[in-house]
Every structure is written in C-alpha cells, then in structure tokens.
Amino acid sequence: MTARCFLARTLVEVGHFRQAAMRAEEAMTLSKGSEEAFGLAHACWVLGLTHLRLGGLDRAISVLERGFGVVQANALSFLSPILGSHLGYARALAGRIQDGWPSSSRRLKKPGVLDERESLLGLRRCWRRSISRAGARPTPP
C-alpha cells in the first residue's frame, strides 16, 4: 500500500495523472481492508493531490477532507500539515476561501512535529498563493 502511494506521488509529479489515480485508488482499497489509519490518510492525500492537479476540485476536496478526518481522529500529527494545507488550497481554488483558512488554522493549534512558527509561515505562503490564484482578497481570521 505504501509503495503504491509513493508510486502514485511520483506519477503525479511527472504528469501521469491517470496512472497516478489508479495507483492511489488501489492504495485506498488496500488500506480500507487493513484498517491502518496511516495508510488510508496517505492514500487520501495522494489521491486528493492527483485530483487537485487534474483540476477536479470537488473530488479533491472530498478525498482530502476524508484524509484530514482520519488524521485528526487518529492523532497523526505529522500528516496534519500536509493534508490540511492541500485541503485549504483546494478549497481556496474552488472559491471557498473562508472554508480554506479554518481547516488549516485548526491544525496549527494542535501540537505537531513542526513548531507553530514554521507551520504558520508555510501556511501563510500557501494561503497567499491560493487567494491570488482564486482572484480574491479575504482577510484571515
């Protein structure tokens, strides 16, 4: 399952999105059977990233929300910044600017691997990029 996730991630980076989606779907199917939270969260992230790169924002948001929920429910704090930032980015691109910021800011309030300053700087960079691409100028809470 993990190998499929890494393969899918590699395929996304070189532009082979259909193959990446197939490998990520396989990883999700395998992780559902194993009941392993990390595997499911990892597969959700890779599949969400694939749909995000393809422009399928609704599908990307759905999968990333599922993965983020798994991360929060199982205290997988090291995956929280990855899934949270991609989820916020996808929501911002979909025009759901106000929905994008809270999911990411909630994740910063939980203890994690990165210290809060590093996470906040990365999040702000991602947020600025998201709102500029979406053509809006919201004020974060």
Image: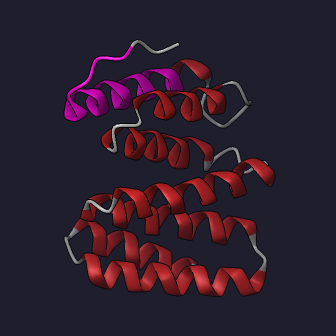
Magenta residue span? 118-138
Left or right: where does residue 48 sit relative to residue 133? right
Left or right: where does residue 121 sit relative to residue 41? left
Q: What residue is rendered at 55% in x and 41% in y?
A: 81
Q: What residue is rendered at 47% in x and 34% in y?
A: 100
Does 97 appear above or below 74? above
Residue 137 magenta-highlighted: yes
Question: Where residue 85 sits: x, y (%)?
Answer: 47, 40
Does 3 appear above or below 114? below
Exactly how many numbered labels are in the figure?
0
Q: What secondary structure is the stretch in magenta mostly built from?
A: helix
Does 70 appear above or below 19? above
Q: What residue is rendered at 49% in x and 75% in y?
A: 5
Give the image quarter of residue 113: top right
Residue 119 magenta-highlighted: yes
Question: Where residue 23 sits: x, y (%)?
Answer: 43, 84
**Which coloring applies here?**
secondary structure
Does 104 appear above or below 26? above
Left or right: where does residue 5 sit relative to residue 54? right
Question: Where residue 91 sits: x, y (%)?
Answer: 42, 42
- In this rendered view, identify the residue nearer to me: 123 or 6: 123
Question: Where residue 137 sits: x, y (%)?
Answer: 29, 17
Q: What residue is rendered at 65% in x and 29% in y?
A: 106
Give the image quarter of residue 96: top left
Q: Quadrant of the N terminus?
A: bottom right
